Every structure is written in structure tokens, then in C-alpha cells.
Image (cartoon, helix red, strand yellow):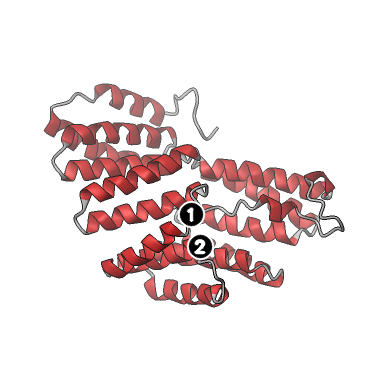
Amino acid sequence: MKGKTSLMIWFLALLLCACAGGNTLKNSLPPDSTAGANELIKGNDRYQRGCYPQALAHFFKAHERFTASDHMAGSAMIMNNIGNVYRAVSDLNSALLFYEEAYIAYMDLKNQDGALQSLTNKAAALIDVNRFEEAANEIARAEKIAAGNPKLFGPLLRNQGVLLLKKGDYPRAQSLLDAALKNTDPLNLPETAAVNFALGTLMVKTDRPGEAIHHFKAALSADRSSSYYMGTADDLAAIGSVHLSRGYAELAVGYFKRAVKIYALLRNQPKVDATRNLLVEASQKAGMNIELTEFFVEKWSREEASERPCR
């Protein structure tokens, strides 16, 4: 299952200073912390676009700045976000190290929300690679932190649901994912996309293609609104796959064409190859010409794009 991770873009928490009167202006921070906040913003922007090497570079710069000024809250957040990048590029061991460090830092700060998010992300990374027992242990740690909180934590519910989904317990998975969607702020676009993508996957597994497309389209809307290019391509490819499985090859071709071109722009060759194979299959069934799409995919794969998203 595609991993979609909600970044902790809690800028108010980052920029708060413990002074009388509650001043929250960024320019009240020491210079290194202000520079760190700027690098954090740049890193978040690159991450949302699916530009992971660039995001990592900005996050490491932010970590250096926050470390120099001993800005513990900023350092904790950066640890979590670096873990998100490593998870996105399938470097599991690095992701786990950074998530655990973020958890420790947040607990030192008595920031339970941050600690809960870091453990939730750590569990999600373990679920990605089917290390279910370890994931369940991290979920249990997160549940202890969440205990007594009257507001349910959407990402934790989502992870619990995805874990059950991958283990084949579909009824309980749907109950948790429905609850996660209900407890997700619609303005939290990354989490909205993540929950809907998980629900779409569940609908595919339980042979409900119409509902699957509904949820994948909801994920697509959220990912497009947040300019999350990689997620957008994943959503398009998922919708195309559902249409292809139902025998609607012509519809599938349209979605696969859009997805493969985004993957080519992002230079994700494994996903280009996988989606191109599906596109060829669908186009042959539909009797459609895909030469122009092939032209652009080849051109962009040779790094001949004039406006590459990750520059």
C-alpha cells in the first residue's frame, strides 16, 4: 500500500516563545532559529511536491540551525519530518531511528501531541513493510499517550485500520478507517488523502469498485489541492487500475496517461515502468494510440523537461 505521511506542519507551536504576553512573531526568535524555520518551510514545500532529496537537504539545514540555537521544539519536529522523508524513499532503518529520536525529544518537552504523531508515523513505516508485530507495539505505545484524550487521533485510527486491512480483517479495518475519516479535519489535506486512499484500497479488496473510485477521487482532490505530486500520481494510477479491472479500458487509459507523465517528471522510474505497462495493456484493449504520451515520458525521463517540479 502506498504510504502517505502527514507532515507535522505546526508552525504556531514551532514559533511560540515562552514570553509574557504570548508573542508569537517569528522575528522574536534568535537568528539561527528563524533561519531554521525558513528551511523547515522550504523542506515541507518540497516534501509535499514529492521532491524528497530536496526536502531532506532543507530539513538537515533546519536541524543544524535549530541545534545551534538549542531550539528543542524545532529539532524534535525536524527529526519527525526527516523520518517522513526516509519512509517515503523506503529507507526504513533511517526512518525508524529519526521517528524514535523525535518521540524522545517530544516526551522531554512534555509535548504529547508531537510524541503521539512520531509513534504513529513509526508504526506506519513498519506497516509499509509488513512488520505487523512491531507496528502493533508502536501503536500500543501511542495508545498509552492518547488514553484519556476525548478527541480521537485520526492518524492513529488510520494506522490501526491499515494494519487490520493488511492482515485481512476487513470489517474491523473499515470500522477504524471510517472513524479516522470522521475524526480528520477536512482542511488537513495530507491526512484526508491518506485516509481516503486507505479506504479506497479496502474497497478494492472487498470488491466494491464504485466506492473505491469514490475514495480514490477524494484522495486525488486533496492531493491536488496540496500540490502533492507523487500522491496525485498514485491516486490517478489507482483509479485507472480500478477502471481496468472492471473492463473500462478507455477510461483507464486516461488516468494512466496522467499518472505516468507525473511520475516521469518526478523521475520515479520504477513507477513509470509499472504504470506504463498498465497503460500499454489498457490502450491495446481500448484500441487507443498512446504515442504522444510515450514521447513525453521518454523526453522527461531523459531530463529534458524545462519545468521539472523538483528543481
From the viewer's perspective, is 257 left or right of 121?
left
The kind of residue on which mark 1 rests is Thr
Read off the residue under disc 1: 5
Q: Nearer the viewer, residue 54 or 253?
A: 253
- Crowding at mark 2 (Cα within 10 Å: few <14, some 14-19, many 20+): many
The kind of residue on which mark 2 rests is Asn
In the image, residue 132 lies at what x, y percent?
38, 72
Residue in the image at 52% along x and 61% along y: 95
In the image, residue 201 lies at what x, y percent?
30, 54
Residue 259 sits in which quadrant?
Answer: top left
Q: Are marks 1 and 2 in contact (CB under 8 Å)?
A: yes
Q: Is residue 116 above or below residue 272?
A: below
Read off the residue under disc 2: 121
**Mark 2 secondary-structure assignment:** helix
**Mark 1 secondary-structure assignment:** loop
From the viewer's perspective, is 237 left or right of 306?
left
Residue farthest along the right direction in this orientation:
20
Residue in the image at 49% along x and 42% along y: 50
Give the mark nearer the N terminus: 1 vs 2. 1
- Work out whether residue 93 can be spotted: no
